[in-house]
């Protein structure tokens, strides 16, 4: 791997364990030479994420719950102290209450709707606002994860990518989303019928297989690197081509 991100720094949110998409992104970015701050959500995740961060040279682990403004402020104060500036922000966070992922959509509760929107979509805006002063003048890149599950929150996230791309473009900062095919992770374990979804995609996708988390990580590397300098406001599908099929 060419070390095209040597001397650059990144903040990666969403590592829960080795299966997390955020972890694959972190491995690809660190493999290209980027120093990273990984975040963990609460003490329960701390030990595991600290151990993972220790596998990436020069990288650190910091706490962050995106639902708490003080937690976000503390995160960026710590990142500024450690890195001074920031070249990449990777947002691989989503949350919906398990009961909201099953059953009829019209039964969605107001509370369930609000939590999913706050954690899965608004958090990108809240993070971007705080990252901006650190990314100024560095040709930064912001990458988030889209998905066709949790469609309402993801629609808001995708629209936010376009608004943020327009806001930040004049400052030389790009904002893009990756729409990944299904992957077995802690979060997807909560989706009813997930094994059937994997089988269905593998049977019908143009590449006739499912994707790997490493493939998402490498696309994140591309979007965080100058190789993608002409791309912003876009959704890149890493789904073995499944999205082109009308079946
Ligand atoms: N697994 C899939 O099939 C798949 C496919 C496409 C996109 N995605 C998206 O990828 C992203 C990462 O999910 P994953 O599948 O790697 O699962 P994951 O469970 O490994 O990661 C989800 C992360 O969100 C974090 N999180 C949730 N609430 C938080 C909060 N309040 N503050 C801080 N962090 C919080 C969790 O700690 C966890 O690290 C999500 O946006 C998901 O929708 C997943």
Image (cartoon, grey):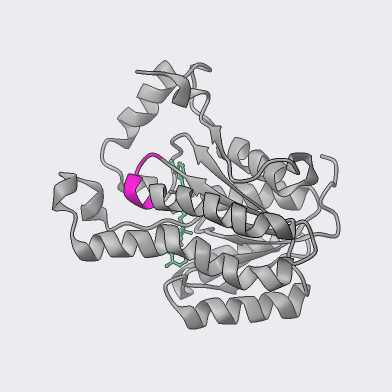
Q: Residue 82 occupies which quadrant of the picture?
A: bottom right
| Above/below status of 135 relative to 182 | below
Q: Which quadrant: the C terminus?
A: top left
The answer to whether 91 appears left or right of 132 in the picture is: left
Residue 3, position as x, y percentages in the image: 85, 47
Residue 150 in sight: no
Q: Which residues are magenta?
A: 148-153
Ligand 1's quadrant: bottom left
Q: Is residue 111 magenta?
A: no
The answer to whether 114 appears left or right of 188 in the picture is: left
Task: Name the residue nearer the viewer: 61 or 166.
Answer: 166
Task: Name the residue nearer the viewer: 63 or 242.
Answer: 242
Q: Which residue: 54% across, 49% down?
A: 162
Residue 73, position as x, y percentages in the image: 56, 80
How many labels were placed on the picture? 0
Q: Which residue: 42% across, 56% down?
A: 94
Q: Which residue: 47% across, 21% down?
A: 244
Q: Which quadrant: the N terminus?
A: top right
Q: Which residue: 34% across, 44% down?
A: 151
The answer to whether 152 appears left or right of 10 in the picture is: left
| Above/below status of 190 relative to 60 | above
Task: Name the residue nearer the viewer: 27 or 128.
Answer: 128
Residue 155, position as x, y percentages in the image: 39, 47
The answer to whether 53 appears left or right of 144 in the picture is: right
| Above/below status of 190 relative to 7 | above
Q: Residue 9 occupies which quadrant of the picture?
A: bottom right
């Amino acid at each position: 791997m060419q070390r095209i991100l040597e001397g650059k720094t990144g903040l990666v949110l969403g590592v829960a364990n080795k299966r997390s998409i955020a972890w694959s992104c972190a491995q690809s970015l660190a493999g290209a030479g980027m120093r990273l701050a990984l975040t963990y959500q609460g003490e329960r995740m701390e030990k595991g994420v600290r151990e993972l961060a220790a596998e990436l040279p020069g990288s650190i682990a910091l706490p962050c719950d995106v639902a708490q403004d003080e937690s976000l402020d503390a995160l960026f104060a710590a990142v500024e102290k450690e890195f001074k500036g920031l070249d990449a922000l990777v947002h691989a966070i989503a949350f919906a209450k398990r009961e909201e992922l099953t059953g009829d959509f019209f039964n969605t509760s107001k509370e369930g709707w609000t939590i999913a929107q706050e954690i899965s979509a608004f958090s990108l805006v809240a993070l971007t606002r705080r990252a901006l002063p650190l990314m100024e003048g560095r040709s930064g890149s912001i990458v988030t994860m889209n998905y066709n599950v949790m469609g309402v929150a993801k629609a808001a996230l995708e629209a936010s990518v376009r608004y943020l791309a327009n806001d930040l473009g004049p400052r030389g900062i790009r904002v893009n989303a990756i729409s990944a095919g299904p992957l077995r992770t802690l979060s997807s374990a909560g989706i009813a019928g997930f094994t059937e979804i994997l089988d269905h995609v593998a049977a019908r996708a143009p590449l006739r297989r499912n994707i790997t988390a490493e493939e998402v990580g490498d696309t994140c590397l591309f979007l965080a690197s100058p190789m993608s300098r002409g791309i912003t406001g876009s959704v890149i599908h890493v789904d073995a081509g499944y999205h082109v099929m009308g079946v």
